[in-house]
Amino acid sequence: MIPRYSRKEISKIWEQKNKFQIWLDIEILICEALAKEGEIPASALKNIKQKAKFEIDRIDEIEKEVKHDVIAFLTNLSEYIGNDSRFIHQGVTSSDILDTTLSVQLKQSCKIIKNELRGLIDEIKSLALNHKKTVCIGRSHGIFAEPTTFGLKMLSKFCEFERNYKRFVQAEKDISVCAISGAVGTFANINPKVQDYVAKKLGLKSEDVSTQIIPRDRYASLFSTIAIIASSIENLSIEIRHLQRSEIREVEEFFSKKQKGSSAMPHKRNPVLSENLTGISRVLRSNSIPALENIALWHERDISHSSVERIICPESLILLDFALNRMKEVIKNLVVNKKSMLENLKKTKGLYNSQRVLLLLIKKGMSREKAYEIVQSVAMVSWEKNIDFKTLLKRNGKIKKYINYKEIEEIFDLNYHLKNIEKIFKKVLGKK
């Protein structure tokens, strides 16, 4: 992953040094388990623990000759350990080490992602609570609909990311498995107790049935969840981008004192962070496709999944970490323009009450079809000629036969549209 979209803590997980260290940890744990079963001498285990180390440059040098990364690693270990290195990697296959390592790396990454997800959720919740009663016009199809509050908009996003968190926790469980089962998963040359021992030590579950590899539907579950989270990030980003448009200006990304928006136009203040997150979301979603395609492999295993995972695993986890952190900062520093929200509400000329007029006419005895026709005709005049909707209603003879002036005034009480906002918040957040 390019440095521009990489954060230090999670990037370290996917560096060669950490990968090889996990390889070594697993190989030593296998030796520990075998020693407990009396299958290798205790003295050999002690010597392996004392002398085992690796050198990345040397591994790369050996790999150029042998064309196999695990063999290169084992060869390098043997150069330090000596004769007792023959006890390392007994009865296991490369994928036992590679897949269990991938599980560890993914689990390490998931811990960071969960923290970032929770941080974003907390910021969205805070924004929702702060603007619970900040009235704005709701829009469907991008067109004025009925009033809502900005807080309710954000409460919806809060719920969405809470669902994402739950999905992610489950996906983490799906990938937190260990397989030390040999060439085709039969444990023919390795005691099944070894897998259980290594799994427990690494904080993983012992895979029920592996082939030569951990089944790839597990990883597909994680990357599908990442794709959903990416879509939620884009959903929130697009809301901000739309509300920042010049003709709306209801919210705005924080713009620092020395920040520049355009090399050509000094007046520009662009929602560049949200746009960036929209782009990153596309990459994260696209990576779910090869993860799904990796499920279908030949027999006990082929290698077609390997190159895919070397790319999408670090890329997706590092990108997701970056995106969540950036989204959190956008929400934390978001500028909310209450004045513009009220101005946009006024631009509707009261048309957001059209449904209330419709329902009252029906209640008074008019057919729905006739009521809709009358209200729509008045609404279109209001819209096209920019005339106050309430004024036109009071002038309309057909409406006056059913609704008096006082009832029309009552219809235009803004609080009517907001009467259940508090109930919705309490349902979601309790009394908080």
Image (cartoon, grey):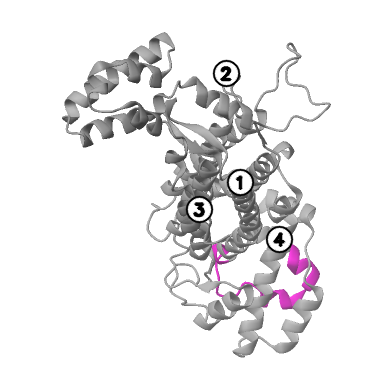
Q: Earlier in the sequence, mark 4 or mark 2?
A: 4
Can you give x and y, in whole percent of width and height, for residue 286 in the image? 49, 38
Label 2 crowd (10 A; few <14 / some 14-19 / many >=20): few
Q: Earlier in the sequence, mark 4 or mark 1?
A: 4
Per the image, label 3 sits on a secondary structure element best described as helix
Q: Name the residue under label 2.
A: 247
Q: Name the residue under label 4.
A: 20
Q: Does the magenta stretch include residue 95?
A: yes
Q: Which amino acid does label 4 sit on?
A: Phe
Quote the CA–CA distance across marks 3 and 4: 49 Å
Q: Which amino acid does label 1 sit on?
A: Leu
Quote the CA–CA distance across marks 1 and 2: 32 Å
Q: What stretch is highlighted in magenta?
A: 76-96
Label 3 crowd (10 A; few <14 / some 14-19 / many >=20): some
**Whether label 3 touches label 2, CB < 8 Å:** no
Q: Mark 1 points at which residue?
A: 320
